[in-house]
Amino acid sequence: MSLKSWWQGVTGQAEVLETAPAKLPERAGYEYGIGPGGLTETRQSIGGATGTDRRSNLTQLYDAYMACPWAWASVNAIARTVTAGGLVMDWDPGDGSGGEEQPDKPAEVLLLERMIAYCNPRENIRQILRGIITDLLVFGDAFVEVVWLANQPVALYSLDCPSMLPIADEHGTVTGYAQVTELGQRATFEPREVIHISLDAPRSGLFGVSPTQAAMLPITSWLFASATSKEIFRKGAPPQIHVDFPASASPAEINRWNAQYQQRNVGPRNIGTPISTKGGAQVQELAQSRTIDYLRFLDQRRDEIIAAYGVPPAKVGIIESGNLGGGTGESQDRTFEVNTCQPLAELVVEAFTYHLARVGFGVEGWRLKLAEIDLRDSKVVEEIRDMRLRSGAWTLNRYRADIGEPAIEGGDRALLVDRTNFVQWDDMDAMSQAGVANRLRGTTLAMAVAQPDKPVELSDLPEAPGAPAPPPPTETLKQRYQRRLREALAELPGGVDERAA
């Protein structure tokens, strides 16, 4: 028996409330990373017995995100794409048919839209959403403060993820939240006053695993390689040399020569200055400059970083040579939207729909969603419109309305465009009969040319619907073609000379 049938049998109502009960039974399992006694303000370790402080780990992720431009570019590309359309209310009938007409918005929906339109005096909903996506990609978790007035939310504020401390028992049941800043400031929250969103974690738990944490190895390697390249170029990319001093050279003379070399030959000002020695010293270059190797290493680590975030190269300003193996620009856009942006968007809207729409305002039949933005190339969009018009899926006025042009008279009739011909859909029967008749005429002409003296066989020449009776069998194909040609010419305005016919 389904839940709906059971509820109808008990209460006599067909509708089933989708909100969770006020009190759930206690679970038996334990959450990963939470030891005996649960999580408190002073015990927020991660990784079980490793004892790693969560705040230190999140600070390290933040520093890596701020220092690596490819991590920054990837996170911002995802956040801006996900939130480009804004947060809107959408009617959700629940049966998936989509054929019903959208009703008027009830009062609770209008109240929710009003709150979303003005979240707080400093931030709008788009900034809050971008902060959520950024925190998810950097830290794996995001927190939003919900300010309540009586039993209704009235404002939303973003919360700093590293300073937020969930308070939970060893089974993972959250009983509250505490915020302790680096300056010693402290605030406490009830569970309903915080929306906590987490990314997927391989071992479950209260905290998610971010792409930044998964990409820490290539990010760290990129930072070290970038710092090495910086030092090389800061010194003017000097050659790697070996100096063979005479056996009589004292350590003081060697040190003095090294100091003079650093002053006179190393640095951008000294590029091109010759290396001079005396007393029999010999200078040899150990190897050519390895700058190109460093740049290739940086590119390799860059590709690993953006792959961890799931961002196509073009989205972060990387121009691919010939786009080998990367598909077209449209396919990259589609992959970026489906594999990277949409899963994040669904996490956010599901949390907001439950905490704000269902619990906060009691909204039923409506849901929050992030509106989509058309990222396709303008030429692709126009080609799709043209195909819809030619196939009859759109009328001309529907086409003009889509591009912002006014309707015209006669533009509400659908047409089928077959190459250079166009036919109205209500004339399709006549078009079909005319096509059959034309093919029969072509067959008659071909047979008349090939066998002009052969009598007409009725079984070989079926007539089109509504055509006149077939000729007598004594008429040859050539004679029949000539007769029809004369009849057609005679119907022309003014007639045609018999000799011309």
Image (cartoon, grey):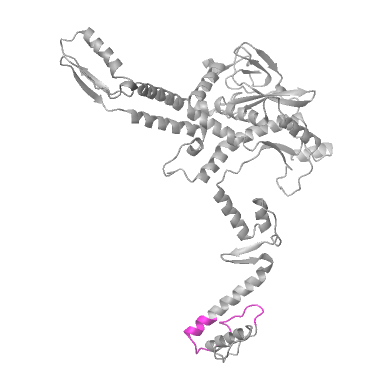
In the image, 104: left or right of 40? right
Question: Which residues lie in the magenta part?
Answer: 444-467
Please say if 15 is above or below 61: below
Residue occupying image coordinates x 57% and y 85% = 485
Furthest residue in direction right, as rendered: 12
In the visual, does 458 lie left or right of 190? left
For the image shown, how many numbered marks are present on the structure?
Answer: 0
Evaluate whether residue 395 shows in this view: no
**Residue 229 against residue 350 in the figure, above or below:** above
Image location of residue 258, percent across then percent down: 26, 13
State the image coordinates of residue 40 (x, y, percent, origin top left). 63, 14
Q: Is residue 352 magenta?
A: no
Q: Position of residue 210 (x, y in %)?
A: 54, 27
**Which corner quadrant holds the N terminus?**
top right
The percent position of residue 96, horizontal first and vertical second, equals: 70, 45
Residue toward you, 432 or 72: 72
What secondary structure prevails in the magenta region? loop
- From the viewer's side, name the closer residue of 163 and 32: 163
Residue 460 in magenta stretch:
yes
Q: Quadrant of residue 44?
A: top right
* In this rendering, position of residue 485 left or right of residue 370: left
In the picture, which quadrant includes the C terminus? bottom right
Q: Is residue 297 above or below residue 420?
A: above
Q: Is residue 128 left or right of residue 264?
A: right
Is residue 471 visible to us here?
yes
- Residue 317's place in the image compared with 376, above or below, is above
Q: Residue at x 38, y 24 (%)?
A: 229
